[in-house]
Image: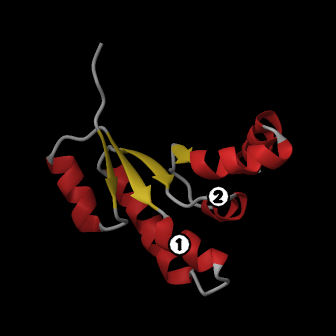
Amino acid sequence: NKSRISLFIEPSLKDLNQAKKLKADCVEIHTGKLCNLINKKKNYTHELKRIQIAVRKGNELGLEVHAGHGLTFVSAKILTKIRGIHEYNIGHFLIGEAIFSGLSNSIKSFKKILKS
């Protein structure tokens, strides 16, 4: 039984190269800045491009790439346009939504977004 190491990093090539150097198995790209821009209805194109480049580089380095922090249904939908993200971490938002619609419905909504 081998433990896997995952590092929570900024969407930067420097951080990705360091993760590879440290022999991490996975990285979780910090999506908080993107999500804040989306929530404030500001231009997020530059940050989305940074994440896209980081995901591509992470995959090239052989790292399993995850994304998370501040995700909502809206920001997760935007991120699904980027190929190569293996896992989305949306726990906090999902539980918050579950208060209003139930956990099962929240999970179904999120799964629907990821499949579209």
The quadrant in which residue 50 appears is bottom left
| Left or right: 50, with 60 as reference point | right
Q: Is residue 104 left or right of residue 38?
A: right
User: On screen, 112 above or below 79?
Assistant: above
Query: Going by the picture, which residue comes out furthest to the bottom?
Result: 43
Determine the residue positioned at 29% across, 50% down. 61
- Number of other residues with Cα within 10 Å of mark 1, as a class: few under 14, some 14 to 19, many 20 or more: many
Measured as percent of width and height from the top left, residue 73 is found at 71, 57
What residue does disc 2 label? Answer: 76
Q: Residue at x 62, y 86 (%)?
A: 42
With 50 as the anchor, is 76 left or right in this view? Answer: right
- Which dot marks residue 95? none
Q: Position of residue 75 (x, y in %)?
A: 64, 64
Q: Nearer the viewer, residue 39 or 78?
A: 39
Which label is found at residue 34? 1
**Quadrant of the rendering where the N terminus is positioned:** top left
For the point 73% across and 46% down, which residue is it? 110
**In the rendered view, how is the structure colored?**
secondary structure
- The residue located at (56%, 74%) in the rendering is 36
Q: Residue furthest left?
A: 21
Q: Position of residue 27 (x, y in %)?
A: 35, 48
Residue 30 higher or lower than 46, as above or below? above
Q: Amino acid at mark 2?
A: Ala
Residue 82 sits above or below residue 107 on the image: below
Per the model, the C-alpha gap separating discs 2 and 1 is: 10 Å
Can residue 90 be seen here? no
Amino acid marked by disc 1: Leu
